[in-house]
Amino acid sequence: MNHPTNNLKRLTLEFIASAPDLKHCPSAQGPEVAIAGRSNAGKSSVLNQLSGNRRTAKVSKTPGRTQLLNFFKLIVPGMSLQGTLVDLPGYGFAKAGRSSQIKWQQSVNHYLANRDPLVGVVMVTDIRHPGQPLDLDLINWAQESEIPLHILLNKADKLKFGPQKQALNQAVAALATPTVTIQLYSAQTGLGQDDLIARLLSWLDAPPAFKSDHSLTP
Ligand SMILES: Nc1nc2c(ncn2[C@@H]2O[C@H](COP(=O)(O)OP(=O)(O)OP(=O)(O)O)[C@@H](O)[C@H]2O)c(=O)[nH]1
Ligand SMILES: [Mg+2]
């Protein structure tokens, strides 16, 4: 699938609604992509980098900032394509307290397992700590559910070029499959933005089709 993404550096994201659980999610507006990952990995920052607006999603140094499922209408400038991006609460945030952690986790799991328009999941990881146990659970779930998963090794700006490449190669060797793809990313600098946008557009444009490409580089 060819997309005119070479010059496309930004997507338009318009807030639709927040929901505590699946039952309260807004009705679907086209195919949906969820942004999932550990608390503090940078999910909300990725949305802001995509939109070019620091205020699209709330970012915080304090883990556990995003506690609801936040829905954003995704409009691609110059194209009729549209869909929805969902900023999910992060997992693995110990300080949240066990009962509220379980509650968030249940709402995320329930959403992922039952949301009909879901066509793909972007999993945000910190490049310095990829493939942690809860990340592996999500990867396994996606494989079993046949939902395409695209892993961002985020905060790549924290590493020099050599270690970035090494981290990418290791992650690809350990985790990549035809439906699990991986790339370097930085929500701070925009590194890898083209590849991420191309991946999103391929999912939104042709939801069931999925082309294997796990050697994405910035
Ligand atoms: N250096 C650097 N910092 C980043 C990057 N992405 C996110 N951060 C920082 O990481 C912290 C957490 O970012 P968030 O976007 O709030 O993370 P989140 O995954 O949405 O967190 P929760 O909502 O708690 O699950 C903030 O201090 C961000 O500024 C990045 O690419 N590079
Ligand atoms: Mg967040």
Image (cartoon, rainbow, N blue to C red):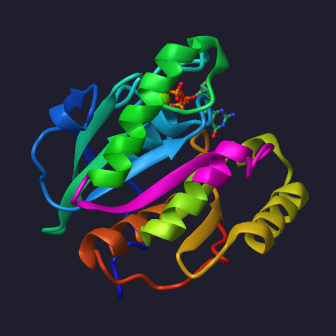
Q: Residue 33's spot in the image, x, y percent?
A: 34, 55
Above-or-below relation of 126 to 214: above
**123 is within the stretch colored magenta:** yes
Q: Quadrant of the C terminus?
A: bottom right
Q: Quadrant of the N terminus?
A: bottom left
- Residues 216 and 111: in front is 111
Q: Which residues are magenta?
A: 115-137
Task: Decide if residue 210 is in sight here.
Answer: yes
Q: Along the horizontal axis of the image, is 69 left or right of 99?
A: left
108 and 35: which is toward the camera: 108
Magenta region includes residue 195: no
Q: Is residue 128 left or right of residue 201?
A: right
For residue 75, which quarter of the picture?
bottom left
- Asked whether the viewer can see residue 185, the reply is no
What's the residue at 35%, 86% (across, down)?
2
Residue drawn at 30 percent across, 79 percent down: 208
* Residue at (83% x, 66% y) in the render: 170
Looking at the picture, how far across and down is residue 119, in whole percent?
A: 32, 65
Image spot of residue 46 (x, y percent): 49, 42
Whether residue 67 is situated above or below residue 86 in the rendered picture = above
Tell me how many marks there are: 0
Residue at 42% x, 67% y is 147
In the rendered structure, the answer to whether residue 93 lies left or right of residue 82 reads: right
Quadrant housing residue 116: bottom left
User: Which percent across, then down, holds residue 175?
Assistant: 71, 67
Residue 30 horizontal side relative to residue 57, left or right: left
